[in-house]
Image (spheres, grey):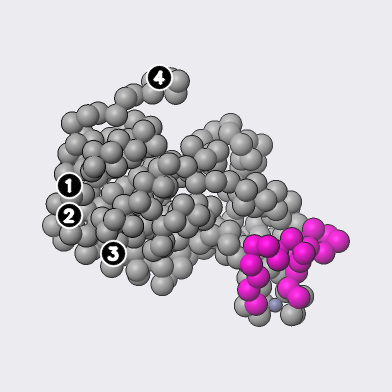
Amino acid sequence: MPSDQRQAPSRAGVERLAELIRESESTVALTGAGISEPSGIPDFRTPGEGLWEKVDPMSVATIDAFHGDTRRFWDFYRPRFQTLSGKRPNPAHEVLAALERRGLLDGVITQNIDRLHGKAGSERVIEVHGSIASASCTSCDARFQLGQVDSLFDDDGIATCTCCAGKVKPDVVLFGELLPQGAMAEAQELCAGAQLLLCVGSSLEVHPVAGLPELTLREGGRIAVVTKGSTPYDGEAAVRLDGDVVEELTAVLAALG
Ligand code: ZN
């Protein structure tokens, strides 16, 4: 379907999801790149878009690339971080924050590094791929906030630690790195305890995050999937909405009254 032919939210699906949220005593959201696309942040897996257009992410966004050619890594990442830091949350992020404020959502687990859930007002956000909020020295573990990082670059274009002159790496999970254990453990616990896992804007294909809905299902919980395109969990989803995430979530919030 061409992207300009947006599908109107399915009324029955929206009503059903609102009902599931009302009934559930513990609802958790799991979000991916699709929730940030309406904020102007393209999914890097979409070919030919944005900053990834001319760069193969596997050649630059890996831990080996960081250590092997740190200058090239930062040449790519520095403008990307500056762009990301200026982005604003969209109504889909705001719906999740509103649900949490109303006591209808326990927290948000996100694969996104853009901090937009926090900016939208979500309180409990588990960033399983890290975030651009900070960067850390790979030698001495000194930590720098996003606003400080730009002052760390040396003449070679490499962010360098002010304590020990080690290489500073953004606190995002690169390809080839393990996910932060604490965040993953918290995400697993939330998903296992959830009566409803609301998956938004994620293709649910990237492991280990892709295994989280399985934990909910195994413990007898339900999953709802709100995303464009297919996911491996479509057959098991109690509700499957595949329209625009902003329109779908806005409709769900309205249906909750
Ligand atoms: Zn250091």
Q: For numbered disc 4, what is the local secondary structure?
A: loop
Please tell me whether residue 181 is drawn above or below residue 233 in the rendered image.
below
Give the magenta-colored segment's residue range. 142-162
Q: Which comes sooner in the sequence, label 4 or label 3?
A: 4
Q: N-terminal of the two: label 4 or label 1?
A: 4
Q: Determine the image quadrant of residue 152.
A: bottom right
Q: Which residue is mark 3?
A: 190
Q: Can I make out residue 102 in this image?
A: yes
Q: Nearer the viewer, mark 4 or mark 2?
A: 2
Q: Secondary structure at mark 3?
A: helix
Callout in the foreground (1, 3): 1
**Residue picked out by circle 4:** 5
Residue under pointer 2? 24
Do labels 2 and 1 touch, CB within 8 Å?
yes
Query: Distance between the Cα atoms at labels 4 and 3?
Result: 36 Å
Quadrant assignment, res 142? bottom right
Give the foreground label among 3 and 2.
Answer: 2
The answer to which of marks 3 and 2 sits earlier in the sequence is: 2
Disc 3 packing (10 Å; few <14; some 14–19; many ≥20): many
